Image: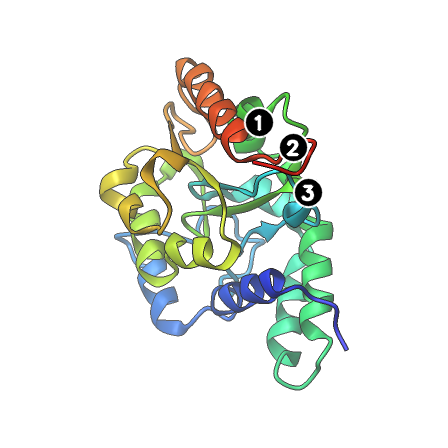
Amino acid sequence: MDNLSSLEKDWLDWAYPIVAVPADHREVCESAAVDGASGEPRLSLVHRFPGCVGSAFESSPIPVLCVAQVHHAAILYDTMSGFEAEMDQWVASRDVDPMADTRFLKAVRARYESAIAKWGPWIQTFSKILNGFHYDPRNIAYANFAKCWQDPKKSKAISCMSACETAFPIRKLAEAVSPKVIIAMTTDAERVIGISSWGIPRDQVIVVTASGPLRWKECRPDSIPSAKSRFADLYHRFAPTESGDH
């Protein structure tokens, strides 16, 4: 018998179609127009990466979902190599093994909570916005708009994001984990990903504008102070006081 919470079960149900990626989505993803799952031949083309709901997410003062753009191919391999076997095992056993979900979530957290801390979006953007509020990768839910990977020198990030938003919309992830705040790092969020459909008030979504040649890794430095100020306001609005009141 597992001890998964309702939120963890909902996240696993959201993640499963990504891990067991259907052939029709792979065909779109790997087309010349999108060029997803490219730039790192050591990664298997049959896999897509769902992100993580952190081990301390549900106990955090307010639940925060961080969304970046698309995996950096070489860095994904360096930090997540071997996780593909865990994904294969989950897909093969979920329907027949009642403990498959529990094992996979444990593997997700063991891999992602370490890897996220080494990734550019966390170092350059999310950690700076959350700094001072005692958040680390264990306290957040994390996903990329695009679940594949690309070489940053040949990126078609917007095409990847659009294709994945059609197949695996962030709205569904937001429904699964019910964040109070979403921090989204993107170049064209309103048009490409349809923030208004996420089921969360627009003032609880902080969009950080990505820029530069590695634009899924970097954001405009001048956007950090305003994003941090907005998060502080939301934190104080929603976080419980010491008495347990909001």
Sequence-first disc among 3 and 1: 1
Please give left or right for residue 198 compared with residue 62 in the image.
left
Image location of residue 115, percent across then percent down = 66, 41
Residue 20 tag number: none
Sequence-first disc among 1 and 2: 1
Image location of residue 149, percent across then percent down = 47, 48
Going by the picture, which residue comes out furthest to the bottom? 96
Distance, label 3 to label 2, CA atoms, is 8 Å
Q: Dot 3: what SS?
A: helix
Residue 7 showing in the rendered view: yes
Label 2 crowd bin: few (<14), some (14–19), many (20+), radius 10 Å: some
Q: Is residue 80 above or below residue 4?
A: above
Tell me the colour scheme of the image. rainbow
Query: Which residue does the numbered mark 2 point to in the structure image?
Result: 135
Q: Is residue 177 above or below residue 23?
A: above
Q: Amino acid at mark 3?
A: Arg
Q: Amino acid at mark 2?
A: Tyr
Image location of residue 128, percent across then percent down = 56, 22
Query: Which residue does the numbered mark 3 point to in the structure image?
Result: 138
Residue drawn at x 30%, y 44% as measured from the top left: 195
244 vs 174, nearest the viewer: 244
Q: Dot 2: what SS?
A: loop
Query: Which residue does the numbered mark 1 point to in the structure image?
Result: 130
Residue drawn at x 66%, y 86% as measured from the top left: 96
Distance, label 1 to label 2, CA atoms, is 6 Å
Q: State if disc 2 and disc 1 touch (CB < 8 Å).
A: yes
Residue drawn at x 28%, y 54% as measured from the top left: 32
